């Protein structure tokens, strides 16, 4: 069964990436772009609070999930 909200999540992620990085900066080299993408992804994973994760960042939600699996 298709889950349309999955596509919405991906579309939101791409839009956020464009709005916060790709449309606001110019990159001189592919390496500069690569580094900026890695930094953005790390910042996004550590600080972006998601309602569907009860206002935890993706990293926090992943850690909590792993802890609950280990405790089970």
Image (spheres, rainbow, N blue to C red):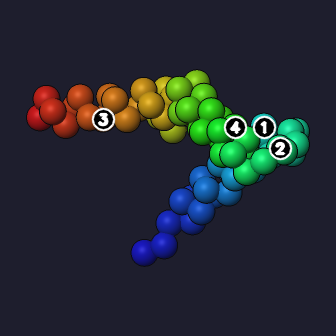
Instruction: Estimate the spatial distance between the alpha carbons at disc 2 and disc 3, rounded to whole Å.
Output: 36 Å
Ranked by sequence position, the earlier of labels 2 and 1 is: 1
Q: Is residue 47 visible?
A: yes
**Height in image: 22 above or below 67?**
below
Camera-side mark, 2 or 3: 2
Q: Is disc 4 in contact with disc 1, using a CB cutoff of under 8 Å?
A: no
Disc 4 target residue: 36
Instruction: Estimate the spatial distance between the alpha carbons at disc 4 and disc 1, rounded to whole Å.
Output: 11 Å
Residue pictured at 48% horizontal, 73% vertical:
2
SS under mark 1: helix
SS under mark 4: helix
Q: Is residue 55 visible?
A: no
Camera-side mark, 2 or 1: 2
Disc 1 target residue: 20
Q: Is disc 2 in contact with disc 4, using a CB cutoff of under 8 Å?
A: yes
Q: Residue 27's mark?
A: 2
**Height in image: 63 above or below 37?**
above
Instruction: Estimate the spatial distance between the alpha carbons at disc 4 and disc 3, rounded to whole Å.
Output: 28 Å
Disc 3 target residue: 65
Residue 61: x percent and y percent?
41, 32
């Amino acid at each position: 069964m298709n889950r349309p909200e999955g596509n919405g999540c991906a579309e939101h992620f791409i839009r956020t990436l464009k709005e916060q990085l790709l449309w606001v900066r110019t990159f001189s080299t592919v390496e500069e772009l690569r580094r900026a993408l890695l930094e953005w992804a790390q910042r996004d994973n550590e600080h972006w609070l998601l309602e569907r994760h009860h206002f935890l960042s993706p990293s926090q939600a992943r850690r909590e999930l792993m802890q609950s699996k280990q405790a089970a």
